[in-house]
């Protein structure tokens, strides 16, 4: 007689698979020949040729220009746009760009009357103290090539020492208007600081009686905070909630001294039991954890 067959092995009641199998729960296991994982038995294809240098700014940006309507925001220091420094600019959803690319995109945007311009005035530490829109005029026409700008808004950051510069006629018209708007915004911020000092803190002259902050207030808080106010989070504020440090239904004002940008995740963290977020001074935040530890975060700075 032959040897009876082995009884079937009992199924494991352990819900966790062995370590070697747990890796493939998210996706199917790789095929035997998978070049992405470096386990192919076939020779790897030759790498494509890489240019020796990155194309210059205009050439790198040319193919990105849309047929109509910009989609991105350009941030650039004033010193970069007038050619005094090589400080990089920044393009939303893309990241840092060279100074040459920033100047090129700003030049194209200056010829498109649909592009919005604004200026952020900073203090000596690079922190935003004022934000102002730059007026456009009828002479701002779409360029001769008929193409619209890649960007929909240009944000220029300018430091206080630049405000004393005379408005040179050699500057493009949009840059002259940007400098004038910055000077007016800085003077308004100076007068506001005097009123706040006399009041012993924030005088709430810019506060809104509504729960939702108006555009002018939202723009200033966004420029001041730049990123989510949790110490380790770098989520941009334009994608965040504007949170009332003291809840609105508990008497908190819709004012810059009581608003701060929080991404949705850290907004929910703040509401958990044991967590507390306070704003001792406008723009400075203190997180108190359930264990009693306190972490401070100061306003982000801008290159100007």
Image (spheres, grey):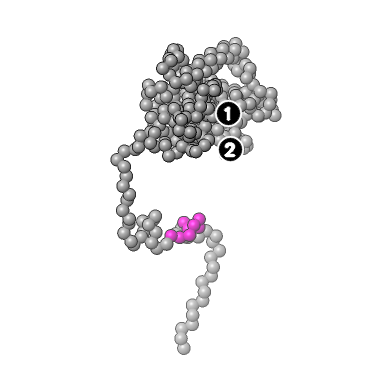
Instruction: Quadrant for residue 53, please give it.
Output: top left
Residue 75 visible from this viewpoint:
no
Q: In the displayed image of the protein, which residue is found farthest to the bottom?
A: 1
The residue under the point 40% across, 63% down is 32
Residue drawn at x 38%, y 33% as measured from the top left: 57
In the picture of the structure, the residue carrying the numbered disc 1 is: 260
User: How many numbered marks are there?
Assistant: 2
Q: Secondary structure at mark 1?
A: strand
Vertical comparison of 127 with 6: above or below: above
Please name the residue shown 53% across and 35% down the image: 69
Report the front residue among 132 and 4.
132
Q: CA distance from mark 2 to mark 1?
A: 12 Å
From the viewer's side, name the closer residue of 79 and 289: 79
Residue occupying the point 57% across, 31% down? 261
- Tell which of 163 and 24 is nearer to you: 163
Q: Please provide percent x and percent y for residue 143.
A: 47, 29
Q: Is residue 230 magenta?
A: no
Relative to 269, 126 lies left or right: left
Name the image quarter holding the C terminus.
Answer: top left
**Residue 163, position in %: x, y?**
46, 15
Q: Circle 1: is it few (<14), some (14-19), or many (20+) Cα within 10 Å?
A: many
Q: Could you say where residue 278 lies in the image, as x and y percent from the top left?
A: 59, 27
The answer to if 27 sits in the magenta stretch is yes
Start-end of magenta stretch: 23-30
Residue with the mark numbered 2: 264
**What secondary structure characterizes most of the magenta part?**
loop
Res 82 visible: yes
* Figure quadrant of residue 198: top right
């Amino acid at each position: 007689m032959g040897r009876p067959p082995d009884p079937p092995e009992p199924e494991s009641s352990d819900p966790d698979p062995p370590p070697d199998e747990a890796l493939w729960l998210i996706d199917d296991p790789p095929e035997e020949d998978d070049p992405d994982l470096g386990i192919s038995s076939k020779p790897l294809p030759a790498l494509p040729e890489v240019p020796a240098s990155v194309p210059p700014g205009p050439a790198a940006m040319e193919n990105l220009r849309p047929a109509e309507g910009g989609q991105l925001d350009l941030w650039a220091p004033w010193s970069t746009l007038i050619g005094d420094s090589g400080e990089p600019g920044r393009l939303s959803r893309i990241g840092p760009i060279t100074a040459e690319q920033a100047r090129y995109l700003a030049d194209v945007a200056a010829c498109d009357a649909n592009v919005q311009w604004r200026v952020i005035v900073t203090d000596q530490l690079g922190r935003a103290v004022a934000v102002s829109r730059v007026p456009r005029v009828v002479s701002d026409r779409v360029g001769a090539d008929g193409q619209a700008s890649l960007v929909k808004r240009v944000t220029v950051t300018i430091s206080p020492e630049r405000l004393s510069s005379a408005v040179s006629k050699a500057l493009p018209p949009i840059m002259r208007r940007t400098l004038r708007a910055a000077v007016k915004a800085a003077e308004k911020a100076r007068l506001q600081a005097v009123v706040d000092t006399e009041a012993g803190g924030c005088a709430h002259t810019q506060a809104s009686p509504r729960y939702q902050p108006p555009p002018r207030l939202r723009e200033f808080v966004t420029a001041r905070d730049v990123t989510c106010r949790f110490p380790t989070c770098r989520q941009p504020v334009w994608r965040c909630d504007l949170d009332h440090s003291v809840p609105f239904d508990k008497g908190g004002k819709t004012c810059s001294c009581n608003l701060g940008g929080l991404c949705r995740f850290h907004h929910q963290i703040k509401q958990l039991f044991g967590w507390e977020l306070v704003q001792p001074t406008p723009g400075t935040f203190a997180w108190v954890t359930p264990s009693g530890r306190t972490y401070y975060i100061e306003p982000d700075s801008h290159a100007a």
